[in-house]
């Protein structure tokens, strides 16, 4: 599936000439969502940070982290439990996320469609992936126009998909999300005075917007731990 989509979007500049997806086909691949299945699972370490302990279909989660703080690790971890449960996921604009690292995070690579270099047509690529995936992760490089963000949010809500936005600064995504996860501080541990081995990256993760309220909650996580997964870090 990865190679299939890479070939489809190898020349993203030609997207305007490609015929629109047939509505009958879209209806067949669109996720069928029962009222009891409107919550997608997440790994145990992230459950306290999210409303109802999971990803609500039709919602938008924004991950904000400066480079090197573990934002990509956190965002990809949001895909691990859904993909392991059989849900299709899409990743747009992430370049090379590292196959081994993703597997250690628990991501089922057989259920993930990657479009690492969508170019200037990233919004169109993301819009098409929303039609056939349950969770789509978009890594931003530049500020997004308000109209583009609004259209993607509306489409994800209409398709009952979860939109995950990864950005270095909150200003790049103009609308915000139902939930915003930010990493104000992170540091690798395990090396002392230039000796030893990295044991993991300890990060403070703050969440705003839990259950629609403007309340902030903070947890300390390993992003990742020494074994490569994401776990809760014990208080020091």
Image (cartoon, helix red, strand yellow):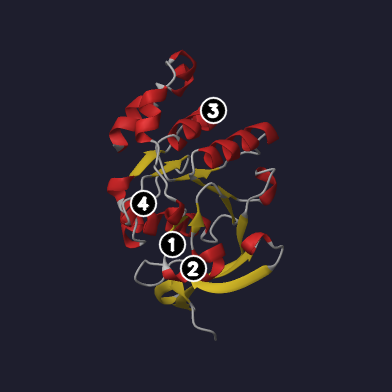
Pick whichever of labels 1 and 3 is earlier in the sequence.
1
- Residue at 42% in and 23% down: 23
Quadrant (top left, top right, bottom left, bottom right) of the C terminus: bottom right
Do residues under tags 3 and 4 come within 8 Å of each other at their CB atoms? Answer: no
In x, y percent, where is residue 154? 59, 37
What's the distance in space between the residues labelled 2 and 1, CA to CA? 6 Å
Identify the residue position indicated by label 1 in the image: 42
* Label 4 secondary element: loop
Q: Residues within 10 Å of mark 1 (few under 14, many from 20)?
A: many
- In the picture of the structure, the residue carrying the numbered disc 4 is 98
Q: Which residue is mark 3?
A: 120
Reading the chain from its start, which is encountered first: label 4 or label 2?
Answer: 2
Q: Position of residue 29 (x, y in %)?
A: 35, 34
The answer to whether residue 154 is above or below residue 15 is below
Q: CA distance from mark 4 to mark 2?
A: 24 Å
Q: Dots 2 and 1: beta carbons under 8 Å?
A: yes
CA gap between label 3 and label 2 equals 35 Å
Label 4 crowd (10 A; few <14 / some 14-19 / many >=20): few
Tell which tag, 4 or 2, sits nearer the viewer.
2
Work out whether residue 214 can be spotted.
yes
User: Which one is nearer the viewer's eye here, 193 or 139?
Assistant: 139
> Which numbered mark, 1 or 3, is in the foreground of this view?
1
Vertical relation: 164 (above or below) 52: above
Reading the chain from its start, which is encountered first: label 3 or label 2? 2
Residue shown at 55% from the left, 42% from the top: 157
Residue pointed to by mark 2: 47
Tell me the distance, in whole angstroms, between the alpha carbons under discs 3 and 4.
23 Å
Can residue 50 be seen at all in this image of the molecule?
Answer: no
Residue name at image x 33 percent, y 62 percent: 104
């Amino acid at each position: 599936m990865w190679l299939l989509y890479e070939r489809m979007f190898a020349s993203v500049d030609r997207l305007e000439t490609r015929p629109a997806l047939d509505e009958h086909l879209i209806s067949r691949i669109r996720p069928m969502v029962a009222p009891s299945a409107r919550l997608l699972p997440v790994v145990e370490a992230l459950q306290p940070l999210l409303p109802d302990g999971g990803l609500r279909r039709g919602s938008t989660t924004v991950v904000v982290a400066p480079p090197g703080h573990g934002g990509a690790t956190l965002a990809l971890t949001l895909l691990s439990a859904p993909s392991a449960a059989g849900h299709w996921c899409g990743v747009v604009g992430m370049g090379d996320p590292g196959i081994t690292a993703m597997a250690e995070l628990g991501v089922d690579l057989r259920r993930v469609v990657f479009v690492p270099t969508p170019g200037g047509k990233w919004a169109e690529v993301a819009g098409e992936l929303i039609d056939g995936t349950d969770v789509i992760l978009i890594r931003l490089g530049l500020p997004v126009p308000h109209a583009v963000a609004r259209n993607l949010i509306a489409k994800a809500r209409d398709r009952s998909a979860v939109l995950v936005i990864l950005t270095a600064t909150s200003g790049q995504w103009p609308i915000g999300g139902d939930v915003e996860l930010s990493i104000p501080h992170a540091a690798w541990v395990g090396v002392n005075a230039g000796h030893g081995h990295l044991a993991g990256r300890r990060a403070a993760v703050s969440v705003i917007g839990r259950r629609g309220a403007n309340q902030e909650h903070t947890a300390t996580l390993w992003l990742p731990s020494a074994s490569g997964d994401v776990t809760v870090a014990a208080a020091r």
